[in-house]
């Protein structure tokens, strides 16, 4: 990581540290079962901004491994999966702008990806990454974990969080967006990448500034700080999200880093990745899929 | 639908230069629907300088938690395309906003106020929006979506058999609700399990309401060719319910199943088959040049 990028992120840590977490947990009986109890969580992040999440804890008395699921790209994040709630103290984080954290800022889709993108200081992902770091701090503070293993899964936000808070046992990263974003957007017209094409089509003079900003948020400049075992998922071919595309990231990653090549059969892929994370965190794989009788 | 027909559509279109390209025009649209709810959407059409009208019309209907599609890529293929945002979705949630989770069980004990009563109509009314566009060939309108979009494909084709020429439904949701909920712990159906765990005495009322909104009961009303794809290990929309809906279709139909697939329902392979199916029935002339 270059000195400029390092200073930027250290300043963000300092900014975040200025705001006490002020965690609120509200039981959500409708999402609780005999095996787990689910809460709505609210936390303060930089801004200050009140972010949100779902936190669920197994009802069994022994400590549970932790799992942080970083927010998806979209307005809605689901309550954690039923079988994850049985096995993990699991936090599904909801970042600023998404539903349940959309006041005063409501993110637009498409649109979020380019908000404030002309400067790293104003880029919306500065706050979003801070939200994820706060989520990591919250999860680590929970007594239910009792110092046990903690995993993290999601997209680039999982990698950035694991790099900035190297206390995770395992990282599972899929469907990266911020990694080589400018290059990737030149190869596709699919959203969300097309958001960047839209922006640069109407403001081509912004390209150098955009490239500079994205450099601060590209996980390749961060993953050398990761100390855990990392699994990246890759698709076929040499394009974005392919194995060759991910090679520089894998080579840079601290700890041990491997790639799982997706079969594109969702049940098979999900079970493999579920088993990998469960193995890293010392719990049992659970399939949510049935075989037709 | 009769109540909706009495409500003027009041369509609006606002150009969105930011999202438009040299070959495709993008508009933010709006129209009035049941309960006078204002429904939003995206409308993408080929630029007439690049491709002369008329164009076939296409409705792209959204998944449960998915954002409504900005269907520029379909316009690039020659379709005048609406990406519908039914009530409760972003940009259509000023008057109605049950949230996610929440939509599936909102007023679930009353068929006259149940969430999907207006939601289904909102999607079907997008056909009327396309009818207002002079560049659209009214005789060539199709509908496509997966998951909740698969459900809306079925209900729209059933509610507008006069207008829909073909439909492609992936992993259809909202079919056999009660059986589906009994077969899974995955959301959104888990919302029903959670609701009935808290209010078991309401099960008969829930069951009665859902019968009116079940895609299996809509399927026999469809007259156009339908293509359906299912993942045989789908945990979100159990395949048994997709098979039941498919069996209830009485018109021309094609089924693609994908072993090892969950709710993706073989999307990796199916995407090209959907594109070919829609092209066969709607006959677009694709736009020359890039986006």
Image (cartoon, coloured by chain):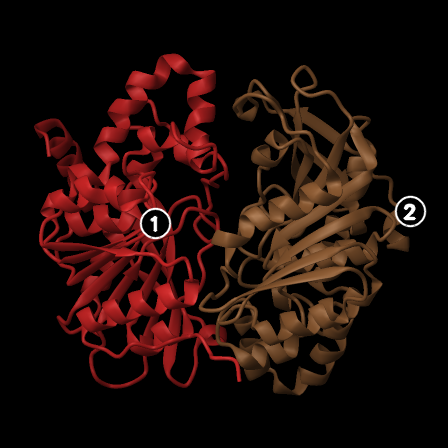
Residue at image location 91% in from the left, 47% down from the top: B6
**Residue B201, placed above or below residue B26:** below
Question: Looking at the image, which is closer to me, A41 or B134?
Answer: B134
Answer above or below: position of B28 versus B22. below
- Mark 1 lies on a secondary structure that is loop
Which dot marks residue B60?
A: none
Colour in which chain A is shown? red
Q: Quadrant of residue B222?
A: bottom right
Residue B166 visible here: yes
Q: Chain B is drawn in which colour?
A: brown
- Which residue has dot 1 on it? A235
* Circles 1 and 2 in contact, beta carbons < 8 Å: no
The answer for how far apart the CA atoms under marks 1 and 2 are is: 50 Å
Residue positioned 31% across, 44% down in the render: A242
Is residue A45 visible in this depiction of the protein? no
The subunit carrying tag 2 is: B
Which one is nearer the viewer's eye here, A10 or B244? Answer: B244
Q: Where is residue B20 in the image (x, y as percent from the top left)?
A: 57, 23
**Tally of numbered tags:** 2
Q: Is residue B169 left or right of residue A119?
A: right
Labels 1, 2: one chain: no
Which label sits in the foreground, 1 or 2? 1
Element at badge 2? loop
**Residue marked by disc 2:** B6
Above or below for A290 versus A176: below
Around disc 2, counting alpha carbons within 10 Å, would you say few (fewer than 14), some (14 to 19), or many (20 or more)? few
| Percent coordinates x, y for residue A28 in the rendering | 45, 71
Could you say which is closer to the camera, residue B270 or residue A53?
B270
Q: Mark 1 lies on which chain?
A: A
């Amino acid at each position: 990581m270059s000195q400029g990028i390092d200073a930027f992120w250290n300043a963000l840590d300092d900014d975040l540290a200025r705001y006490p977490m002020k965690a609120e947990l509200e039981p959500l009986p409708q999402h609780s079962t005999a095996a787990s109890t689910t809460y709505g969580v609210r936390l303060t992040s930089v801004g200050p901004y009140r972010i949100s999440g779902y936190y669920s804890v197994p009802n069994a008395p022994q400590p549970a491994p932790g799992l942080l699921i970083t927010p998806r790209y979209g307005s809605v994040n689901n309550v954690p999966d039923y079988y994850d709630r049985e096995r993990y103290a699991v936090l599904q984080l909801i970042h600023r702008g998404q539903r349940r954290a959309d006041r005063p800022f409501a993110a637009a889709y498409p649109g979020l990806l380019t908000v404030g993108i002309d400067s790293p200081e104003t880029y919306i992902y500065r706050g979003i990454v801070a939200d994820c770091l706060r989520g990591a701090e919250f999860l680590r503070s929970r007594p239910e974990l009792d110092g046990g293993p903690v995993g993290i899964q999601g997209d680039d936000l999982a990698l950035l969080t694991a790099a900035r808070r190297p206390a995770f046992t395992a990282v599972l990263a899929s469907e990266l967006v911020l990694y080589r974003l400018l290059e990737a957007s030149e190869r596709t017209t699919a959203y969300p990448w097309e958001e960047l094409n839209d922006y640069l089509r109407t403001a081509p003079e912004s390209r150098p500034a955009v490239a500079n900003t994205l450099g601060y948020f590209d996980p390749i400049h961060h993953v050398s700080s990761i100390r855990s075992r990392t699994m990246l998922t890759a698709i076929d071919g040499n394009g974005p999200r392919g194995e060759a595309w991910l090679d520089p990231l894998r080579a840079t990653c601290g700890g041990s880093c491997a790639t799982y090549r997706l079969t594109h059969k969702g049940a098979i892929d999900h079970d493999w990745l579920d088993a990998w994370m469960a193995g890293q965190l010392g719990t049992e794989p659970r399939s949510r899929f049935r075989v037709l009788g | 639908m009769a109540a909706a027909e009495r409500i003027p559509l009041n369509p609006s279109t606002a150009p969105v230069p930011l999202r438009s390209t040299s070959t495709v025009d993008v508009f933010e649209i709006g129209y009035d629907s049941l309960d006078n709810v204002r429904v939003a959407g995206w409308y993408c059409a080929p630029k007439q300088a690049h491709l002369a009208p008329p164009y076939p019309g296409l409705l792209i209907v959204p998944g449960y938690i998915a954002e409504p599609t900005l269907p520029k890529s379909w316009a690039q293929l020659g379709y005048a395309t609406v990406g519908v945002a039914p009530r409760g979705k972003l940009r259509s949630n000023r008057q109605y906003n049950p949230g996610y989770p929440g939509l599936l069980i909102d007023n679930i004990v009353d068929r006259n106020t149940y969430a999907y009563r207006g939601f289904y109509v909102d999607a079907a009314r997008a056909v009327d929006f396309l009818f207002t566009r002079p560049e659209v060939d009214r005789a060539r309108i199709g509908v496509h979506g997966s998951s909740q979009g698969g459900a809306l494909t079925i209900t729209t084709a059933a509610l507008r058999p006069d207008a829909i020429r073909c439909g492609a439904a992936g992993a259809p949701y909202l079919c056999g609700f009660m059986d589906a909920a009994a077969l899974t712990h995955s959301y959104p159906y888990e919302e029903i399990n959670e609701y009935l765990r808290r209010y078991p005495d309401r099960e008969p009322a829930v069951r009665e309401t859902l019968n009116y909104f079940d895609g299996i009961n809509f399927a026999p009303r469809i007259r156009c060719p339908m293509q359906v794809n299912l993942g045989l290990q789908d945990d979100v929309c159990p395949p048994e319910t997709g098979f039941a809906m498919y069996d209830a279709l009485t018109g021309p139909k094609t089924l693609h199943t994908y072993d090892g697939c969950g709710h993706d329902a073989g999307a990796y392979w199916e995407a090209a088959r959907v594109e070919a199916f829609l092209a066969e029935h709607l006959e677009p002339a694709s736009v020359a040049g890039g986006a």
